[in-house]
Amino acid sequence: MAGRRNALAAVDAARVQALAENLEAKLFHRFDDRQLLARAFLHPSAVSGDVQSNQRLEFLGDRVLGLAVAEMLHIQYPGESEGALARRFTALVRREALERIARQLRFGDHLILAKGEEDSGGRDNAANLADACEAVIAAIFVDGGYEAAARFIWHYWAAPMAGEKSPPRDAKSALQEFSQAQHGVLPVYRLIARQGPAHAPHFEIEARIANLPGATASGGSKQAAEQAAAEILLERLVAQDG
């Protein structure tokens, strides 16, 4: 237990206090262990030795978010098929959704970063924001249990969920359907470049159909970059056909 406390006690008391006062009301949870909340914002670039960053919390938060969103969808859309629910689920748990919530709550203001990461725009980095959002969910879960974490998720994910009147199709699926229907082939995705450190990579991807001009886009993950490239290419091809 002593070792665990030492690993968690990575942020000074004054900063922890300010963080809690600023965020606890927005998170609908008062922390018994406020160092957990602080660790949710502790970027890997800012830690050393046995101090833990927010990466383990991020891993857990992803699973808690998935369960809560699945529960929400199961309750809110009792007549929809598994496939329709799966499309809604993917849209709600993807990195872009997490980033939106993190920006809404100004999580970037609270990230604890090394100087180099901060100087390179780390507070506005989409991957950093999404990771912090998942870590915050896990911190609430560890400190207060599933009901506390679900309360936070239901509050901030209800509006995006209700905004989709019909199950969304992700851009890659839509491009695949278009490509097969119009050209009889599948789209191809090619990695053009990978930049940034291991904890905050940045990918540039090209989407292409046969020998037609491709479209490129970038993102904090390969999946995000592929989705963005697919969306750009699909919009272009639909406009040309129209």
Image (cartoon, rainbow, N blue to C red):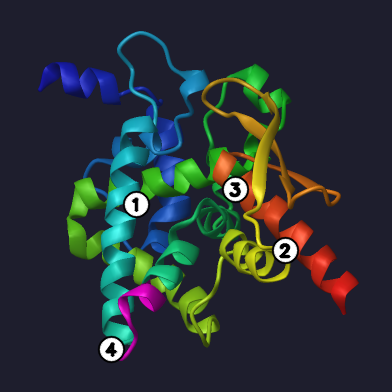
Give how far across and how far down residue 241 sits, in percent.
Answer: 86, 74
Q: Nearer the viewer, residue 98 or 20?
A: 98
Can residue 82 be found in the magenta stretch?
yes
Cα separation, mark 4 vs mark 2, equals: 37 Å
The numbered dot on residue 224 is 3
Can residue 69 be found in the magenta stretch?
no
Badge 3 amino acid:
Ala
In front: label 3 or label 2 = 2
Give how far across and how far down residue 89 sits, in percent.
Answer: 40, 67
Badge 2 amino acid:
His
Quadrant of the image containing the C terminus: bottom right
Q: Earlier in the sequence, mark 3 or mark 2?
A: 2
The residue beneath circle 1 is 137
The single residue placed furthest to the front in the displayed view is 184
In front: label 1 or label 3 = 3
Q: Secondary structure at mark 1?
A: helix
The single residue placed furthest to the left in the displayed view is 1
Q: Which residues are magenta?
A: 78-85
In the rendered image, is residue 30 in sight? no
Contact? badges 4 and 3 (CB < 8 Å): no
Cα separation, mark 3 vs mark 2, equals: 25 Å
Cα separation, mark 4 vs mark 3, equals: 29 Å
Identify which residue is drawn at 51% across, 85% down.
166
**Horizontal placement of 239 versus 60: left or right?**
right
Q: Nearer the viewer, residue 183 or 232?
A: 183
Give how far across and how far down residue 126 sits, in percent.
Answer: 62, 44
Q: Crowdedness of circle 2 by 10 Å Cα count: few (<14), some, many (20+)?
A: few
Badge 4 amino acid:
Pro
**Horizontal placement of 99 versus 144: left or right?**
right
Identify which residue is drawn at 30% across, 24% down.
9
Q: Secondary structure at mark 3?
A: helix
The numbered dot on residue 78 is 4
